[in-house]
Image (spheres, helix red, strand yellow):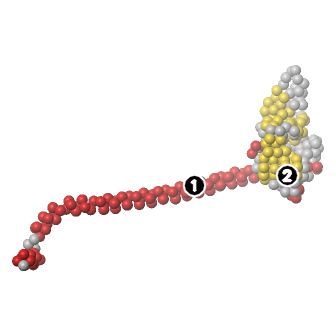
């Protein structure tokens, strides 16, 4: 009872006079390190959680930016492809300005570049007016002629096919010959001109119109080399095709091949 009364008296005096304030201050100072140590794990956890949360946000933001970048790159690539396609189509259409007959644009469906048979399949057939023998060109020159036709598609034999022969003439002087495929997309040959024929590297070869298949005057290729051998009666002449035989995507079909003029 005495201790209880004494405690009660001390509390009343402390409440009114603040007698225990110095003691409380000293005890608070003494136990402050203990409080800091006790609070340290919680602070570390809060700091770590904030750090990992920020890192997760940064990672998520980085992933979003990367995905956006990929999308933009894909769009840019598509725009580049559309620009190239637009240029190619414009060149293709411009090459038809001098045509005095209807033309038909066809897209590539399939390629068969067997060494012994250079064939491509296009998406236009007899229903679109395609006929066997029609001349096929691109924006740079002659690439082949229609070999087979079905109602919805057709097969074009490229001029690089070993079995294909094309009547041509030298644009510089009108010298005529026949150009043959070699099975290589970058090389055609003439093997029927004598050693003294007036033909030289750099000469442009164009269609002669003979044979009634190809209209006259379309560029076919450029003479790359002329090899003569005194022991042989004919020169070996290599020609580089003008048309992009290995990059065909769209082609022009010249209508009504049977109406071609013959030189």
At x 87% / y 57%, what residue is drawn? 151
Pointer 1 residue: 70
Q: Nearer the viewer, residue 87 or 34?
A: 34
Horizontal and vertical percent position of residue 125: 86, 55
Pointer 2 residue: 154
Q: Quadrant of residue 188?
A: top right
Q: Which of 99 and 257 is in front in this view?
A: 257
**N-terminal of the two: label 1 or label 2?**
1
At x 7% / y 75%, what residue is drawn? 3
Q: Is residue 66 in view from this perspective?
A: yes
Describe residue 136's horizontal placement relative to residue 40 as left or right. Answer: right
Q: Nearer the viewer, residue 46 or 81?
A: 46
Inter-mark Cα distance, 1 to 2: 39 Å
- Residue most extreme to the front: 1
- Circle 1 SS class: helix
Answer few, some or many: residues within 10 Å of disc 1's Cα (few below 14, many 20 plus, some between 14 and 19): few
Horizontal and vertical percent position of residue 76: 62, 54
Answer few, some or many: residues within 10 Å of disc 2's Cα (few below 14, many 20 plus, some between 14 and 19): many
Describe residue 206's horizontal placement relative to residue 39 as left or right. Answer: right
Describe residue 23's horizontal placement relative to residue 239 as left or right. Answer: left
Quadrant of the rendering where the C terminus is positioned: top right
At x 85% / y 57%, what residue is drawn? 152
At x 88% / y 27%, what residue is drawn? 234
Q: Residue 247 carries which label?
A: none
Horizontal and vertical percent position of residue 185: 78, 39
Quadrant of the rendering where the N terminus is positioned: bottom left
Q: In this view, does 99 lie above or below 229?
A: below
Q: In this view, does 73 lie above or below 6?
A: above
Q: Is residue 13 in view from this perspective?
A: no
- Circle 2 SS class: strand
């Amino acid at each position: 009872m005495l201790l209880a009364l004494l405690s009660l008296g001390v509390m009343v005096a402390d409440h009114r006079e603040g007698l225990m304030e110095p003691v409380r201050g000293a005890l608070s100072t003494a136990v402050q390190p203990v409080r800091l140590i006790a609070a340290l794990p919680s602070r570390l956890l809060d700091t770590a959680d904030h750090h990992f949360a920020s890192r997760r946000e940064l990672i998520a933001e980085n992933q979003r930016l990367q995905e956006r970048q990929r999308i933009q790159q894909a769009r840019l690539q598509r725009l580049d492809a559309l620009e190239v396609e637009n240029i190619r189509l414009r060149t293709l259409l411009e090459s038809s300005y001098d045509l005095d007959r209807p033309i038909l644009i066809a897209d590539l469906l399939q390629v068969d570049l067997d060494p012994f048979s250079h064939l491509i399949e296009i998406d236009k057939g007899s229903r679109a007016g395609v006929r066997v023998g029609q001349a096929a060109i691109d924006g740079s020159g002659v690439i082949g002629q229609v070999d087979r036709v079905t109602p919805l598609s057709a097969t074009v034999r490229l001029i690089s096919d070993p079995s294909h022969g094309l009547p041509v003439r030298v644009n510089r002087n009108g010298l005529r010959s026949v150009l043959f495929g070699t099975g290589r997309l970058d090389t055609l040959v003439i093997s029927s001109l004598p050693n003294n024929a007036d033909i030289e590297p750099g000469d442009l070869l164009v269609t002669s119109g003979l044979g009634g298949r190809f209209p006259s005057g379309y560029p076919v290729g450029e003479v790359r080399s002329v090899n003569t051998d005194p022991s042989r009666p004919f020169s070996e002449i290599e020609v580089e095709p003008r048309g992009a035989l290995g990059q065909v995507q769209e082609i022009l079909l010249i209508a009504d091949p049977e109406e071609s003029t013959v030189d």
